[in-house]
Amino acid sequence: MSDYEFSDEEREKEIQKNKKTHREENPDLKIYPVKIEEDKLGEDKSYYPLPSTPHFNVYLGRIRSGKSVLLQNMYLSKKRFYGDAFDVRILISESAKNDVQQKNMIDEFDFFFEEYSESLLAEILSMIEQDKQDRRYLLLIDDAMSEKGIKQSRTGRDRFTQMITRYRHIGSKVLETEGRLSVGLALQYYKFLSTTLRNQIQGFFLLGDLPHNELKKIAEDYSFMGGDEKEFIRLFTETRKEDWDFTYMNIPNMEMYRNFEELVWSKKEKSKDNVSTDAESESDSTDSEEENQRKEDTDGRRIVREEAKKISTISESTPDKSRKESSRKKGGKKVRKRRIVGKNRKRNKPKTDPSCS
């Protein structure tokens, strides 16, 4: 028997429980060992920083990277993460029966299938579309991305790709509401994700050690986290401080976390920092300009005062000699004026003696 022992009453309560979309702040976001008793854990009513439902989450990691433990925390917890988000849970896994860690999921999920096929997927989608009850579905596919598993066509016409591109609307025709299907995909190799699928991811989990070439490709595709590939890899390194640490990216919110507890990078916070820096620079520039202006005004007033003082000193030091020179100048002008007048004055012609004529 699994370590998660749900009574029939608890199971029924889980199925009947309505989906909760809003939760309390400061949730318990730690990843616990599978054997812990959940009754000792605090209740969490918020999906954040996880994507809301419906969603498409991808869990990438090799064997023994911690995927199984993370998935069980995410989907089997009764009070945390997505534990109360779904009424019907469906598991498709080729390796679950041979994995002791995943046996809990086989026992607790409502439906379990060992092999993936397009016909099986068609039946599942048909069941959801025809369900007239307001039930929320989870489809978790583990290790089916292989040569004999999910085969994606380059044109995107395979049923799985078509489902992912419209999962947010599956089941909405009946209730005229948002779709009721969330999809979780666990795989070992990034190359199995087509470009179409990569563009649809909301929650992206990177677990364990990743080969350099694979990490480089992920950095290339998600360089918007941090700004460029080099910065992405630096941030990725910051998320791996201890054993079993994993990298989590909330794509819609543009956030990167170390596990769930430590926010390593956020576009929103980065924008705030940029605005704050610009404001400080502008303020410093304005202060500098004002200071320069004050200095110029002060220097100008000082120069004016000095010039006025010089003029005043010259005026005070000028004796009567200056005034006499000034008077002589004025007198000279008068003399010249009188000479000019005298020069132009008409002279009386001498009277002619008639006797001399």
Image (tube, rainbow, N blue to C red):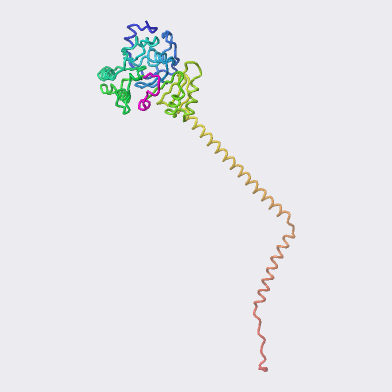
Q: Where residue 114 sits: x, y (%)?
A: 32, 13
Residue range corresponding to the magenta coloring: 185-199
Nearer-the-camera pick, 131 or 68: 68
Magenta residue check for 192: yes
> Does 249 sit above or below residue 79?
below
Residue 299, quarter of the rendered image: top right
Query: Horizontally, is 247 left or right of 97 in the view?
Result: right
> Does 230 sit above or below residue 65?
below
Nearer-the-camera pick, 202 or 192: 192
Query: Horizontally, is 175 left or right of 214 in the view?
Result: left
Disc tally is 0
Where the N terminus falls, by quadrant? top left
- Residue most toward the front? 147
Residue at image position (59%, 41%) is: 292
Nearer-the-camera pick, 265 or 161: 161
Magenta residue check for 141: no
Q: Where residue 316 sits: x, y (%)?
A: 72, 54
Residue 216, quarter of the rendered image: top left
Q: Where residue 210 sits: x, y (%)?
A: 45, 21
Residue 42, quarter of the rendered image: top left
Q: Where residue 16 sits: x, y (%)?
A: 31, 12
